[in-house]
Image: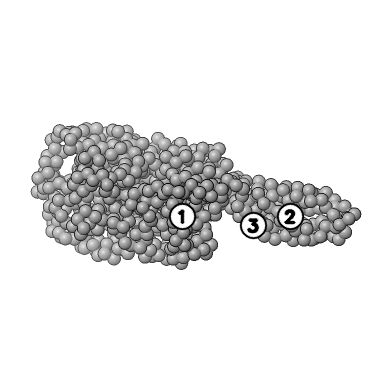
Amino acid sequence: MELLCPAGSMEALRAAVQNGADAVYLGCGAFNARMGAHNFSADELQEAVVYCHVRGVKVHLTLNTLVSDREMARAADVVRTAAILGVDAFIVQDLGMIDLCREIAPHIPIHASTQMSIHSLEGVQQARDLGCTRVVLARELPRQEIARICAKSPVEIEIFVHGALCMCYSGQCYLSSVIGRRSGNRGQCAQPCRLPYGYGRFEPDRYPLSLRDNCLIERLGELERMGVASLKVEGRMKRPEYVAVVTKLYRAALNGKKITPADLAELEAVFSREGFTQGYYDGKTGAEMFGRRQEVEGNRDLFAAARATYENGENARVGVRFYAMVRQGLPAQLAVEDDDGHICKTVGPVPQEAMVRALDPEELRQRIAKTGGTPYRCDAVKSVLDPGIMLPASSLNAMRRDVLAELTAVRGRVAPMHLGAYNEPPAYDGVSGAPQLTVSVRSEKQITPRLLAAKPAVLYVPLAELAEHPDLAQRVGLETQLAAVLPRVVRSGENAGLAELLKTAYQLNVRQILVGNLGQVRIGKAAGFAVRGDFGLNIYNSRAMNYLRREGLDSQLLSFEMTLPQLRDVSKAIPAEVLVYGRLPLMLTENCLIRAQTGSCACTSSAPPRLVDRIGEEFPVVRDPGTCRSVVLNGKKLYLLDKLSSFRGMGLWALRLQFTTENPGEVDTILDEYRHGGTFDAGSYTRGLYTRGVE
């Protein structure tokens, strides 16, 4: 298995390489999910690639953020530069960026970032069809799901084995974005989940969104038997000493060392949030998974020892074989060969007749094998040596230095490659005229007579709610299409239950589904449904929209992190929808926040619990329909019903009203305000990000 380690700086990169990483991942420029890390310039990236390739280490470049249309040409320059410099893989979130990477540098493998929220075999298969050769699975998956996916995966599987855990499924968190314009999908997450919150009232010592760090160092054998290809260590924002310690111990474990309590204590000392957790891997969520960052006293010696591993010399890690020929009357010859088949040769002076002591084979071997201070380890020396001759040690040393220097140059060299040109994607103007109305509800009770009388183009209802209320299909008129909303997370092990619900919906004459995850596109098509895309797909640019057109989606809700100009300019390759009212979903969590507050499952409570932050803002917590996962909603509702004219002329197909915690009376009030205009109340409402934008 590959050990993949973080490189937030050149120093951290050396720490990873010198302690046994097989590959490193790093950012270059403005298109990666850790914009707070150092990130590499083009010159630094070139240095990093050469340094790593000489030592047999691969370099994966993170391009795992959402990219706007106006940024795409600049992103193409980064892709082109990285390809020329020889990076070994791109780690990508944005569907449009995957298309761009394939266009510019089709020979470089693409890895689907954990930001794509892939958590099922169907998601892996869809990523393969996109052109990905590896998928980084969601961190929430238990061992059974990982094994199930690995057993049938058409591509390599990578999982996080150590480091920070997000409370929310990666790629589905909008908390930092909505409350502070610092978008996690754009690499600017401010980590508000690490702050204190209370239930109902603020509690300064309660941290219900802060998880302990992951640590699977004692489970590596299981992961290898499953067929996991790559083990990923989180930490591009952490110091080089952290990278050194974690890499060293995981390398030792992979090499067969039995991990001791002292080793675990060392991992905890270098960085910890009140210990570690294996909760997701073991399928045991709950209070024991949570913790705050703690500083351990007395780790100065540990950090000093860690620095020594990458500051004091080289860890010889590249095996080489030498071939020497020292013959009477001929120039001495020396060649070196590595495991990649590179062979470098040099010629030295003609040996002299021995006057005092002749050169013997053992002395020749010892001289040539002295590779200290280089990245190379001498595995063998084969020689042909005539008797009775001598060659000065200085000559042998010079020949050895020459062939190793040439080998270093060869290993660091990038082969010339053909790169594609950047082309603007086709532009589609979209729908002329005023956008239609669509409505999303969480509960059957919100489907009021006034809502049905409004005749929305599409009414989105949770799949589980449709199954519980089969009369809905008859209640909705012919002018309104009924679409079943799938949970954003449906694991492979949950497919049987999903299939039954889809069968029920189909029997009720429902023919459309709304999906918020890539894998569900495949599931919906296979079940015979027309597929519409929800916000969870994070569609942010024209290339992504064009991909959805090729996939045959019927419509797409554009990201609510986009600005009005971006909404206007994006290609309407398929009918485009925009959210104009409702509580924005901020987090989707595997840990049940409702049970955390009540001590028991209370998903059906009419009064959802509310998280309260330090400034008194409230965030309702509801169940994701059809699951036991929690959704944290924004306290203030998005409200643009008095600004609907702003969306005219954009080519949009529809404007959506999204009802979550509203009672039937509130639903009717909002429908009236949609038709006749309403008043914006800054105390209860927000304009969202359409005018403010995100960083």
532 versus 691 height, above or below: below
Q: What amino acid is labelled 1 in the image?
A: Glu
Of badges 2 and 3, nearer the viewer stands 2
Q: Which residue is mark 3?
A: 319
What is the CA distance from the residue labelled 3 to the residue labelled 1?
30 Å
Q: Secondary structure at mark 1?
A: helix
Dot placed on the residue nearer the N-terminal end, 2 or 3: 3
Q: Secondary structure at mark 3?
A: strand
**Residue at the spot x=87%, y=52% of the render?**
352
Q: Which residue is mark 1?
A: 266
Which label number is shown at residue 133? none
**Residue at the spot x=26%, y=37% of the render?**
688
Q: What amino acid is labelled 2 in the image?
A: Ile
Can residue 645 be seen in this snapshot?
yes
- Which sits in the foreground, 550 or 539? 539
Q: How many marks?
A: 3
Which label number is shown at residue 368? 2
Crowdedness near tag 1: few (<14), some (14–19) or many (≥20) residues, C-alpha within 10 Å: some
What is the CA distance from the residue labelled 2 to the residue labelled 3?
14 Å
Q: Are marks 3 and 1 in contact (CB under 8 Å)?
A: no
Q: Quadrant of residue 383?
A: bottom right
